[in-house]
Amino acid sequence: MLKSYKYRINPTDKQKEQLERTFGCARYVFNYYLDRKDKLYKEEQKTLSKIDCNNHLNRELKEQYKWLKEVDKFALTNSIFNLHTAYNNFFRNVKQGKANVGFPNFKSKHSNHCSYTTNYTNNNIEVGFAENKIKLPKLKWIKAKVHRSFNGVIKSATISKNASGRYYVSILVDTEIEYLPQVDKNIGIDLGISDFLIDSDGNKILNPKNLYNYERKLSRMQRKLSKKQPGSKNRRKMRIKVARLHEKISDTRNDFLHKLSSQIINENQVIISEDLNVRGMVRNKNLAKAISDVSWSEFTRQLEYKAKWYGRTYTKIDRFFPSSQLCSICGYKNTEVKKLSIREWTCHNCGNHHDRDINASRNILQEGLRRIS
Ligand SMILES: [Zn+2]
């Protein structure tokens, strides 16, 4: 099973120079072959495979531009491979009638996010767990914050620089699956806005408190940024401040989501949630809703892969299942509960009193278990 481990690195100035050079060359190669493929197709209706491009890179382009030889060769080859993946995604989406992935774009020099990927061969990538350092091709050892260890075979490493100028390495590792011991407990979960998660055991989990404050602070800062003069020193300073806050928000959110998804996977054998139509919801302008949307899709993604890692079962049930309207005790359907304002209700049939969301998560659990068996 492939797992990735991301670490922050602190390169020296010299290492930074080499990183920037590699980002630049990887971007150059990507743009060069995007342009070449495009022209060749338009003028002669010919296509270039990734192998064609890579051979051309090694035999001709590197001879023409010797500076391409100064950087990690895998970074350039992977750049070509990424270009082809972008092409394939585009054509697959066209075939399937989806419009959400566009034609590959040229990579801009002025983009705030840069990255390249390198492959493992002959110990060219190593992690010093005790020494807090990581070895990468053409860079040697870089100081790092190695907060997690792993067992397995390193496949590749992706080096990136984010908008506030911090560097990270994400190491892809082939590891053995470590199944957790089986447990008897199963759980149904409902995802909400005021409560992030409501489960069939009756627990309600709030969103982290500081998240909403950070979001408000962010929109204030973004307004300020837009008033600063383009190209000015103040604008650049403000842009970095905004980027740092963005990172703080995503760190806070990810930390919360990871802890919660791990806990749920640890404690339960079968986990059921609703399949949320996230794409439809992201269009919503409401701030609190927008935050939740991002978290929900990331959270269900985590449940999905962690269930695979640890040998649990995770299933989604379609959103047309009326989880809120059914009585989880007797199955009676109360269509009045369609109204979102009804937070509690009493079943006309069996007389049980329900909390709207807890009842929904119990129905999600029952329906999920029924479909599995
Ligand atoms: Zn009932």
Image: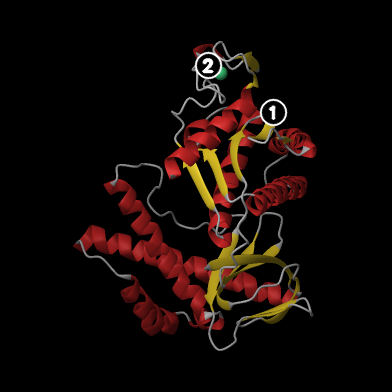
- Image side of residue 369 versus residue 45, left or right: right
Q: Which one is nearer the viewer's eye here, 221 or 182?
A: 182
Q: Position of residue 334 (x, y in %)?
A: 51, 14
Residue located at (65% from left, 29% from top): 193
The residue nearer to you, when weighing 200 against 155, is 200
Q: CA distance from mark 1 to mark 2?
A: 18 Å
Image vertical order of residue 351 relative to residue 128, above or below: above
Q: Which residue is mark 2?
A: 338
| Secondary element at image label 1 | loop
Quadrant of the picture in which ligand 1 is shown: top right
Residue 355 or residue 214, whichever sits in front = 355
The residue sitting at 58% across, 51% down in the picture is 269
Label 1 vs label 2, nearer the camera? 2
Expressed as whole percent of the image width and height from the top left, the position of residue 296 reads: 59, 40
Residue 178 spot, x, y in % from top left: 60, 67
Q: Amino acid at mark 2?
A: Lys
* Quadrant in the rendering for residue 123: bottom right
The reply to whether residue 286 is visible in this rendering is: no
Residue located at (58% from left, 14% from top) = 347
With respect to residue 256, does 31 lie above or below? Answer: below
Way the structure is coloured: secondary structure
Q: Which residue is mark 1?
A: 194
Q: Nearer the viewer, residue 333 or 204?
A: 333
